[in-house]
Image (cartoon, rainbow, N blue to C red):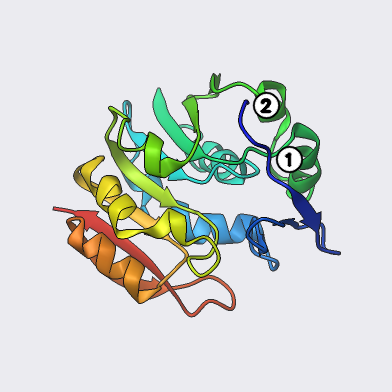
């Protein structure tokens, strides 16, 4: 991958933290369990995914969401498209270190492709679009059936949660498409409502009382 690399620090638990945004890449409790709860279950992927289904994501990070999706949809006929928008890709060595915490996931295939922006992984056809999503998403010609909104905390990375960007998420969502995110921040929920989603608040993972999910009319 090209682009400006992320700068990381590490918690004692082995969790990477963005020094740019002072926020961890995934839950300190159990990042994989959080991904399953928020993004896989929050978008009802196991029931909905089928040939041609298109998942899009704001924030590729360590690739944990991608690997959890691959595991969750094993046995679902492909191809399934997976498009991720990432402004600050992390180095391969850091991704490998972070993913060691999730031994039940097979990260080898992803790490072999690390640095590429288009590749196939199992039934997933993956594209990683580098750059500021405020610039790249408006120019994207795709429409997703499900969104993983996984930027850093809105309080620390407000650029990835603006009204304008949430409107672009809505504009790039199929009728009947969905989103899920760990945040229940009021301004994010209002922006997604304005973007055309019916937004609901759901129980969050771990210490987070609430998360948000929604469907496009």
Label 2 neighbour load within 10 Å: few <14, some 14-19, many 20+: many
Which of pointers 2 and 1 lies earlier in the amino acid sequence? 1
Q: Residue at x 40, y 22 (%)?
A: 79
Find numbered disc 1 in the image and state the secondary structure of the residue it sits on. helix
Instruction: Please state the total of marks drawn on the protein image.
Output: 2
Name the residue beneath numbered marker 2. Answer: 114
Find numbered disc 2 in the image and state the secondary structure of the residue it sits on. loop
Residue most toward the left? 217
Residue 84: image x %, image y %?
A: 47, 37
Could you tell me which quadrant the N terminus lies in?
top right
Residue 216: image x %, image y %?
A: 19, 52
Q: Residue at x 71, y 45 (%)?
A: 104
Specify whether 137 is left or right of 91: left
**Can you see residue 41?**
no
200 lies above or below 133 = below
Residue most toward the right? 12
Q: Are marks 2 and 1 in contact (CB under 8 Å)?
A: yes
Residue 13: image x %, image y %?
A: 82, 63
Residue 106: image x %, image y %?
A: 70, 35
Residue 186, which numbered label?
none
Name the quadrant containing residue 142.
Answer: top left
Name the residue beneath numbered marker 1. Answer: 95
Q: Residue at x 37, y 47 (%)?
A: 147
Name the quadrant containing residue 140.
Answer: top left
**Can you see residue 156?**
yes
Q: Residue at x 38, y 38 (%)?
A: 135
158 lies above or below 3 = below
Specify whether 189 is left or right of 106: left
């Amino acid at each position: 991958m090209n682009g400006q690399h992320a700068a990381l620090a590490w918690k004692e638990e082995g969790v990477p933290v963005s020094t740019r945004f002072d926020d961890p890449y995934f839950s300190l409790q159990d990042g994989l369990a959080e991904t399953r709860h928020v993004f896989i279950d929050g978008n009802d992927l196991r029931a909905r995914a089928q040939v041609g289904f298109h998942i899009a994501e704001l924030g590729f990070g360590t690739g944990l969401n991608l690997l959890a999706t691959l595991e969750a949809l094993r046995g679902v006929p492909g191809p399934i498209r997976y498009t991720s928008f990432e402004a600050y890709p992390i180095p391969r060595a850091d991704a490998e270190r972070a993913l060691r915490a999730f031994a039940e996931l097979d990260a080898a295939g992803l790490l072999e492709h690390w640095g590429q922006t288009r590749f196939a992984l199992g039934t997933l056809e993956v594209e990683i679009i580098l750059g500021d999503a405020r610039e790249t998403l408006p120019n994207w010609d795709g429409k997703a059936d499900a969104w993983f909104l996984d930027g850093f905390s809105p309080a620390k990375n407000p650029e990835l949660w603006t009204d304008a960007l949430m409107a672009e998420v809505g504009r790039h969502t199929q009728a009947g498409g969905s989103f899920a995110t760990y945040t229940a921040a009021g301004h994010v929920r209002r922006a997604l409502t304005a973007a055309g989603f019916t937004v609901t608040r759901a129980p969050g993972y771990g210490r987070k009382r609430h998360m948000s999910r929604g469907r496009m009319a």
